Amino acid sequence: MTESTGAPEVHDVDALWRAFHQAVNMTSRELEDWLRTDAAGTDTEATPDEAGRPAGQQVVHVLGKRKGDLTPDDLQLMQRVVTTVRERTDPEAEPQAGDAAWRRHLMSIGHDPLKPPA
């Protein structure tokens, strides 16, 4: 990581790209569908491109990019997602499988903890 921006250095992009795509086990379509479902309320429903948490929308955006088109902000988001998924899925810290808030949070950034490994 560069100290001034907090973004990964150029030689780390390949490793971050792989880690991000391992952590994000939902397709962009699955994530978009989840964000719309999770954001739907009884009184109002967000438009598809505004549904869900901003981080989830950013993950969808990054999933649609090529590695060479990543910005420093994209790289920071990718690192946050990888770190969050690793911390939240640590077997020693993992909540009970019935903890809906835990699963909803992970799914809002593209990781379905109940999805079998590919």
Image: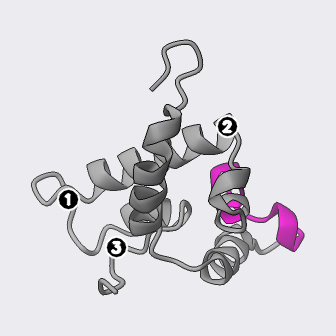
The three-letter code of the residue at mark 2 reads Asp
Q: Residue at x 58, y 80 (%)?
A: 27
Q: Residue at x 68, y 53 (%)?
A: 68
The three-letter code of the residue at mark 3 reads Pro
Q: Quadrant of residue 53?
A: bottom right
For disc 2, the marked residue is 73
Q: Measured from the top left, where is residue 8 in percent x and y?
A: 49, 33
Secondary structure at numbered mark 3: loop
Callout 2 touching callout 3 (CB < 8 Å): no
**Which residues lie in the magenta part?**
47-60
For disc 3, the marked residue is 113
Q: Which mark is residue 94?
A: 1
Q: Quadrant of residue 109?
A: bottom right
Q: CA distance from mark 3 to mark 1?
A: 10 Å
Nearest to the observer: residue 10 or residue 65: 10
Q: Residue at x 49, y 56 (%)?
A: 17
Tell me the mark number nearer the camera, choosing from 2 and 3.
2
Residue 44 visible somewhere in the drawing: no
Secondary structure at numbered mark 1: loop
- Is 68 placed above or below 101 here? above
Nearest to the observer: residue 91 or residue 2: 2
Residue 50 on the magenta span? yes
